[in-house]
Image: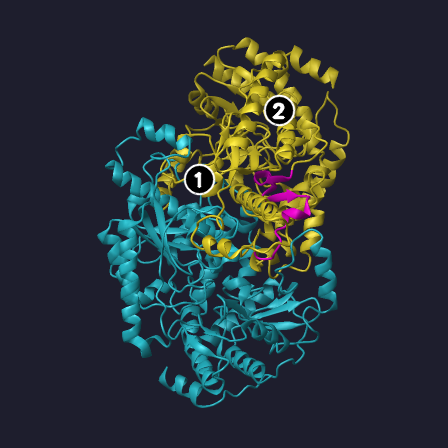
Chain colours: A cyan, B yellow
Amino acid sequence: MASFLRTASCARPCISRSIARPSSRIAIPSITAVRHRQMASAAATATISDAVEQPFFPDEPAGPIVKTAIPGPKSIEAIERLSKVFDTRSLNMMTNYEQSFGNYIADLDGNVLLDVYAQIASIPVGYNNPSLLLAARSPEMASAIINRPALGNFPQHDWADILETGILKVAPKGLHQVFTGQSGSDANELAYKAAFMWKRQHQRGGAHVDFSHGEISSSMENQSPGAPQLSILSFKSGFHGRLFGSLSTTRSKPIHKLDIPAFDWPQAPFPLCKYPLDQYAAENAAEEKRCLEETERLIKDWPLPPAAIVIEPIQSEGGDNHASPNFFKGLRELTRKHNILFIVDEVQTGVGATGKFWAHEHWGLTDPPDMVTFSKKAQTAGYYFGNDELRPNRPYRQFNTWMGDPARALLFRAIIQEIERLNLVENTAMVGEYLYSGLERLAQQYPNEVKNLRGKGQGTFLAWDSPRRDEVLKKAKTVGVNVGGSGEKAVRLRPMLIFQKHHADIFLESMEKVFKA
Amino acid sequence: MASFLRTASCARPCISRSIARPSSRIAIPSITAVRHRQMASAAATATISDAVEQPFFPDEPAGPIVKTAIPGPKSIEAIERLSKVFDTRSLNMMTNYEQSFGNYIADLDGNVLLDVYAQIASIPVGYNNPSLLLAARSPEMASAIINRPALGNFPQHDWADILETGILKVAPKGLHQVFTGQSGSDANELAYKAAFMWKRQHQRGGAHVDFSHGEISSSMENQSPGAPQLSILSFKSGFHGRLFGSLSTTRSKPIHKLDIPAFDWPQAPFPLCKYPLDQYAAENAAEEKRCLEETERLIKDWPLPPAAIVIEPIQSEGGDNHASPNFFKGLRELTRKHNILFIVDEVQTGVGATGKFWAHEHWGLTDPPDMVTFSKKAQTAGYYFGNDELRPNRPYRQFNTWMGDPARALLFRAIIQEIERLNLVENTAMVGEYLYSGLERLAQQYPNEVKNLRGKGQGTFLAWDSPRRDEVLKKAKTVGVNVGGSGEKAVRLRPMLIFQKHHADIFLESMEKVFKA
């Protein structure tokens, strides 16, 4: 690793691929071709060296292709048509997924961009990934698509097997059970419901204590005690989704919340750390202490006592805000002290992007979180838990018609296999270091463009602040890069796990063009 | 139709199929075989007559097979294994979907039951439907599975086409736009959010009026005016889902609501009608008038004014409660009068089961609902709307990462094609009449078993009250039928749209066995 870093930070990387070199038409490979390629690729990746990096997907475009303004004429026509029936005002690119491959996203006008946004951080192993294509074409997948079960009533006979070889194979340490859902918002709300039921059970005196008549009747009136005066504590700038319960814990931007009724739940301050974190260790520690104290005060004093706190390991939509492992350890201690639950929202950070499978592994907790929620790169969703008390004391309390989706669970299993086959978590840790070093160099060269670079040691989960963020995102497209923002001024990088050093080189060179322009 | 009904009600149907006749192993048919069969089947259905009904799927089992107690030994073993990682306390049958076909659901012990519950009303055209299998194996589906887009930002280039030839092809009259989601709960919450944004926009004075500073800052604190003191009015016994906002409008059973915080939103009484509706027309009209008056009082007086009312055309989870078209017309008038929105929740009633594609078509409204939500049999979800004002005035207000799922939208398109190919809405209307007549006969013969039979003229969306409901559901399995309940005492029928007269015969004969036992 040391020699790798030295190479990366001391010299401009040698780029053998030219940007905008035309590539041949990208076709979805046949299954036979896929098998051959997988074997070849597996052999190649076994001998990766720092000096000569083998691409995971030799068929990937050699570099971006920018043929027209984006949107180009064909895209404009398609957008106009779609606008008649679907809201396109947030549209970023009218995408041609048939022509997208690996790290590259294509549009209708022949533009092919290096994609470090990846469907808002939700594509894990590349567009038209051949291994996923095999899984998608399997008889199991076809059955899961056309015979969608009500999992709580009529689970498929191999559901345990699908869970154990997939979702549960990568369960965070100490959390060996799962309740499956359909999206990140849904996963968080399911976790909140489990937390409320757990808290009320404790308050009632245990699982064996029946609901009172007053609880039963008041619940039907949406009044306490049946609908309890409890809350979920979240953090300023946090994002946990946009359904009514999850939105009440979301504190990212007014546009997410305006005009929507919300629960009167508390928000604690998230540490306003200075970057790089290690250079400001003492100041950041003081700031984190302040936030922990305020969190404890809210736990004790808020009129609707929290049943749980929920937090992202790195606040993502809210601006890529980081804190130290000590802060999160402090939260774990506070929740134990006050007998409430600790929910870690890994919807955006989970599945490898930080260089560990789950971002909270960076904290070195000896006592795991009570629940970890997941979605996005998992392409399915849910919450992991370990404590049997988090299974409500009766059936049909945590229940809905579909309770997840076996088709998406099968896809996550294939994603996990691909991650293992190509060592993608390790790859992301390594490429993240390389990319961070390159960005450090850019920050030195363009101090007015790259401020507060952050995410060191967190894989490719990197960001910086830009004084002209929206302009930078727009210009990035003109040099062949699709990149997103977070918060008010952050440029956030969310490459896929198959992002390699040669992609980092293209990205860095492209951003330099933007900064020079 | 008249002669058909006479036949059905005057004599016990002649059943040529014996229950529990062993059928050959059900295999997923090959694509070639499927094509042949489709052509044969299409030709056959074109000449359906009342006298000799051609089966839609000749490969379907001839009748149920009951080999063991349910669960049998193999199922018990599988349930024990699954219990270690997944909540199985609500498990009804450990299902073998590979062996299920058409209207028949199979388990691991060789039991094959006639399924009139259909994954809680969510399987439209049969297990392992050959046409859906073709769609599931198509390159478009494979791409949609492995390249899941963030639809709001990066829609696929053919998304307009998928919508127009699928979801929007069956849009309710007057509602030509859609916002897509992932489940019934999700669809309802998205509709509620649209309603709140619409109402606040009216209160502010129009789409051009900016948010005030106070709204912006208070929204981030979950306080009004930014998080407005508004509500959604729903009805007693209604069910609209189990996320926090939708659960606040759900009033079905305490077990759905206990221990979960809820908004202080109003519930109006749903008419407690007597059945058959037409025999008690005057009494029912008076009851409906009472409910409309109380609804209006709540709209005017509830401290948190409603932005919308939400109602199911037939209350499903809450006990299969019906009301007349006049009641729903009255609600439409009330919402116009008080400038609030009328949301019709067709999550369970939609997609053909009532003998019309949408159940609200039975009402003969001249002024359509403002929004209609859908899911279940559609296998995708969302809300239809017509008024452009229901598109929020800015992008990113109604938004989330996935905003639906093109894979499931493609499946709905295939379902729609299958419904059209086999005339399944018409079939359901016809078979519903036949089944209702048979149940009327059973109600006469077993008046202590079949009470308050209801759903006449509503396709196969039928139900009755049973004084020993749970026992009846359990015994039904022993005679080869999988049937569900709703509310406290209703037996609810939710057959698929491919349920035919010969299935109705088997069902009626099986229920008679249960009643005699």
Magenta segment: does it hold A182? no
Extreme residue in the bottom direction: A11
Residue bounds of the magenta highlight: B370-396
CB-based contact (under 8 Å), mark 2 and mark 1: no
Q: Gap between marks 2 and 1, in whole Å? A: 26 Å
- Image location (x, y in percent) of residue A165: 41, 54
Tell me which amino acid carries mark 1: Phe
Q: Quadrant of residue A109?
A: bottom right
Q: Tell which subunit mark 1 falls on.
A: B
Residue A120 in view (yes/no): yes
Task: Using the rendered view, name the quadrant where residue A452 is placed.
Answer: bottom left
What residue did someone put label 2 on?
A: B327
**Residue B478 percent coordinates (x, y):** 46, 24
User: In the picture provided, is B247 more to the left or to the right than B41?
Assistant: left
Q: Which chain does the numbered disc 2 sit on?
A: B
Quick check: B426 left or right of A259? right
Q: Which residue is identified by label 1?
A: B263
